[in-house]
Image (cartoon, helix red, strand yellow):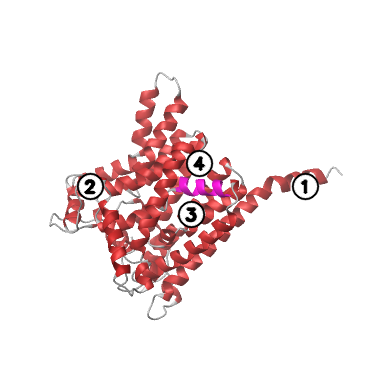
Amino acid sequence: MNCAKPRAGWREGWAPHVRMVLWVLAVFVVSRGIVLVAAHSALQQPVSASDFMVPMFRWDAAWYAKITEHGYEYADDGKQHNIAFFPLYPWLTRLLVPLMPGEEHRPIWLAQAIVSHLGFLAGLFFVYGFTRRLGNESAAAWALCFVAFFPPAMFFSAGYPEGLFLALASASGVALLKDRIVLAAVLIGLAAACRPTAVAFVPTLLYCAWKCYGGSSRRIWRLTAVGLLSVSGGLLFACFLAYRFGSPLVYTRNFEAWLDSHRVYGWWDMLVCQPWINRGEHFVKALRDGPVDVRHLLEPAWLTLVWIPGILVISVNGLIFDRAELRKFYWIPIFLFLIPYVSSRGTPPTFEAIGRYLSVAYPVWVAIGLWIDRGRWKPLAAMLLAIMAVLMAYTAYCFALPGGPFVG
């Protein structure tokens, strides 16, 4: 009898962790399988096993591969250069390249795939843990599914830093729930070395730090230190640009050169959501002038008309009505939208890419998981997930299609 009690306690202690691992691995394998199968179906001819990840390395992935192989370059010639892309992702892939088999670009592609997928897998674990602290295992499982099957989530399998960014961002959220302010600042600082949109996480960090440090006489100094730590990745990149190219402002000049090659909107047009209006009018015109190929109507660029407003509505609703523990995190999706929207002045490529930036807005997926678990919407949520999985597959297909549309 004495031997049975420790055994039951061991099972009770480990069972939740085992279920977490099984859920995360299942969602990871199924979602990535859908993406890769869809991407390969876009190829005109099959590829060898050593080139299995080739369909996922198009668009910006080529820029990151060039940084990994040759480093950064810049010339003030009015063209875009690779200093537009932040360094943590290509530098991590560079560390793995000597360990990878193959020739030519294959080691770089394989290293990018490993960093992207390991980052995404780690991000799923952190999203599960974050949701589990606010709810139960059912809510955490729903949140995982929405993270993994959101159509722009196909970028977690591409040669992009989204998977790594999700891991760092969601890990910082878990740290904030535990009042580990310095750790959260370090993680956000690392995320800032992936993408400048990491600044979206800083207001929530500073608010949590303000509440955590209470009436300390050194509160302002601590807040300043935490704030600097949270943007340290971007600051170090600016120092690198100043050392290598003479000024950190080369990043701005490079960005302006890119803007000059695209249509930009005035501030009033952006305020009244003219980019949305133009896309909506174009969509309605395509329907009116029909017949229209259904694939044209489902292009990922159109889907931004749905994803962005939906995520913003959920975030604003959460700021007003949701529980106090999660409310402070709803600023993250809002800033993840505003930063690229304002900085790029609504240019079409950036507007279409905002869905990708919002794929790391983990508070939205956590909120959806909690709402589904508390309500009676599970059949409807399952139907929505099935639709999202199909759209994610189609997004991956468009991404890999030679000469296909820009998907973000």
Q: Amino acid at mark 2?
A: Leu
For the C terminus, give its image quadrant.
bottom left
Which residues make up the magenta segment? 362-372
Decide if residue 313 is on the left or right side of residue 405.
Answer: right
The residue nearer to you, when weighing 194 against 200, is 200
* Residue located at (59% from left, 55% from top): 378
* Residue located at (58% from left, 60% from top): 26
Q: Amino acid at mark 4?
A: Val
Residue that badge 3 annotates: 147
Residue that badge 4 annotates: 174
Decide if residue 22 is on the left or right side of residue 324.
Answer: right
Quarter-of-image position of residue 239: top left
Residue that badge 2 annotates: 241
User: Which of the two marks, 1 or 3, is nearer to us in this view?
Assistant: 3
Secondary structure found at label 1: helix
Q: CA distance from mark 4 to mark 1?
A: 30 Å
Q: Is residue 346 magenta?
A: no
Q: Earlier in the sequence, mark 1 or mark 2?
A: 1
**Residue 103: x percent and y percent?**
36, 72
Q: Earlier in the sequence, mark 4 or mark 1?
A: 1
The residue nearer to you, when weighing 196 against 309, is 309
Secondary structure found at label 4: helix
